[in-house]
Image (spheres, helix red, strand yellow):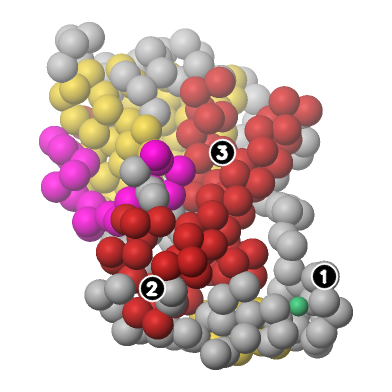
Amino acid sequence: MPELPEVENTRRYLEEIGLPGRTFSSVSIGWARSVREPALEDFVLGIPNRRVLEIRRRGKYLVLPLTENDFEPAADLILHLGMTGGLRVHPRSQPAPPMVRHTFSLEDGRELRFIDPRKFGHLWLVPDWEDALPTFGPEPLDDSFTSQALAKILNARHAPIKALLLEQSVVAGLGNLYADEALFLAGIHPIRPADSLSGDEVSKLRDGIVAALTTALHHYDQSRVEGWPDPPFGLSTWTIPRRADEPCPRCGASMVGIRVRARSTFFCPDCQPRE
Ligand SMILES: [Zn+2]
């Protein structure tokens, strides 16, 4: 499932391929239920003749402010990639890859193609993206994501730390894989109550989150430069094996697999002690 690095990679790709400044001529929606807001007809009518001002990201969402008059944003197009979604910009003449659900035609002869095999992606076209999306916690790659900011959030909660890291209102953009990786890097057991973490542990967790995400982003940056197969879903920056009984890469103990709020969770019982 695309998490922050995968969505940020998509954002950087769309920027590099020159989507900002381009104008949509039409849109074809191949799976009506992907459109969350407004009604399908209004969504389709709201796209043509609007120009992409920029590509932004908030958590796991992409936000494209659109303009009609080159100055003020007229609407925000929001894209969520769901479980398996991806975005590519291709010339209209290039055969579309399989599983393209939605096609945004551009006036320059290219198309923004929303590939979505499992159809869990979503689209919005709204006056203001902030009104359409839930409240987010801090962006972990922003300067404001300090140990103190994280401690303030975690000290008020008693839930297992792994569960909280998956809540977008705690930290924006983290998902199952990067949460496990961050906890491993920090040496913290996934079911420790959040309010039991010491200041030093919160600091290590903050650093682990940033390290897990930036390592992945470097990998993606390299993949775009070197033209690895797109989109590069085969991420291989994990420190930890995501399989029980595999040896911990740090100490050799057998990794343990459990479920935390129904999400598969892997940790090393020696490097991430319960107490
Ligand atoms: Zn270990």
Residue labelled with disc 2: 164
Q: In which quadrant of the rendered image does the C terminus lie?
A: bottom right
How far apart, in angstroms, are the residues tagged by discs 3 and 2?
Answer: 24 Å
Looking at the rendered image, the disc whose residue lies closer to the viewer, 2 or 1, is: 1
Residue labelled with disc 3: 9
Give x and y (percent) for residue 189. 56, 81
Side of 182 relative to 24 (left or right): right
Q: Earlier in the sequence, mark 2 or mark 1?
A: 2
Q: Secondary structure at mark 2?
A: helix
Instruction: Please report the bounds of the magenta region as a residue range.
Output: 126-143
Q: Secondary structure at mark 1?
A: loop
Label 1 near ligand 1 (CB < 8 Å):
yes
Residue labelled with disc 1: 249
How far apart, in angstroms, are the residues tagged by discs 2 and 1?
Answer: 26 Å
Residue 117, image quadrant: bottom right
Give x and y (percent) for residue 231. 65, 42
Viewer-side residue, 46 vs 2: 2
Q: Earlier in the sequence, mark 3 or mark 2?
A: 3
216 up-or-down from 70: above or below: below
Please report contact status of discs 3 and 2: CB closer than 8 Å, yes or no.
no
Viewer-side residue, 168 vs 123: 168
What residue is shown at x 19% (from left), y 44% (from top)?
130
Viewer-side residue, 127 vs 115: 127
Q: Is residue 61 magenta?
A: no
